[in-house]
Image (spheres, helix red, strand yellow):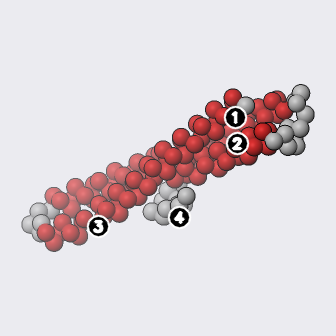
Amino acid sequence: MTLANGSYEWYKRAAIRSRRAFRFSETAILAISSCIPLSAVFASNNSAAPAVLGAAIVVISGLRSIFYWQDNYVRFSRAREAVEAERRRYNINSTPYDDPSTKDEILTYRVTQIEQGEMDNWLKVALEGPKPGSAQSNSSSIEQ
């Protein structure tokens, strides 16, 4: 159960960090983007302001593409909930955890499978990169 608890806590913290980073980046892009036309109105003789704001958007967008915050948030949340489901079944001695002599081994195996599946999904994201229209290539958000 220590392995399952540790895995659950790691995925929980990682999901929260990724969700915060994703929401911050989306909010920053929206706020900075809205300032570009305002800077053109209020500082019409200063081309530096819109250029700096535009550069900030490019940097934040690039960071989203590098760190995959939304994809990580979704993957980590999915893995966390899968581990939580196994912990619940284990705690109530539900199948396949109804045999005390094998329940720890089965829990270890199942949590390891969840972690390996999440790692496989991460490798797909990392190797393929963002696809046109995917979460990382547009500014859609996810609520939870």
Instruction: Tell which residue pokes out farthest to the front in this image.
Output: 92
SS type, badge 4: loop
Q: Is residue 110 left or right of residue 138?
A: right
Looking at the image, is mark 2 or mark 1 earlier in the sequence? 1
Q: Are marks 1 and 3 in contact (CB under 8 Å)?
A: no
Instruction: Tell which residue pokes out farthest to the left in this image.
Output: 45
Of 67 and 28, nearer the camera is 28
Looking at the image, is mark 4 or mark 3 earlier in the sequence? 3
Task: Name the residue located 73 percent from the left edge and 31 percent from the top edge.
Answer: 1
Residue 12 in the image: state x and y as whole percent: 57, 42
- Amino acid type shown at disc 2: Val
Q: Are marks 4 and 3 in contact (CB under 8 Å)?
A: no
Task: Name the residue located 84 percent from the left edge and 32 percent from the top edge.
Answer: 103
- Amino acid type shown at disc 3: Ser
- How crowded pointer 1 is (Cα within 10 Å; few <14, some 14-19, many 20+) is rated as some
**Marker disc for residue 34:** 3
Looking at the image, is mark 1 or mark 3 earlier in the sequence? 1
Mark 4 or 3, closer to the camera:
3
SS type, badge 1: helix
Looking at the image, is mark 2 or mark 4 earlier in the sequence? 2
Residue 23 in the image: state x and y as whole percent: 44, 55
**Marker disc for residue 23:** none
Residue occupied by mark 4 = 133
**Marker disc for residue 83:** 2
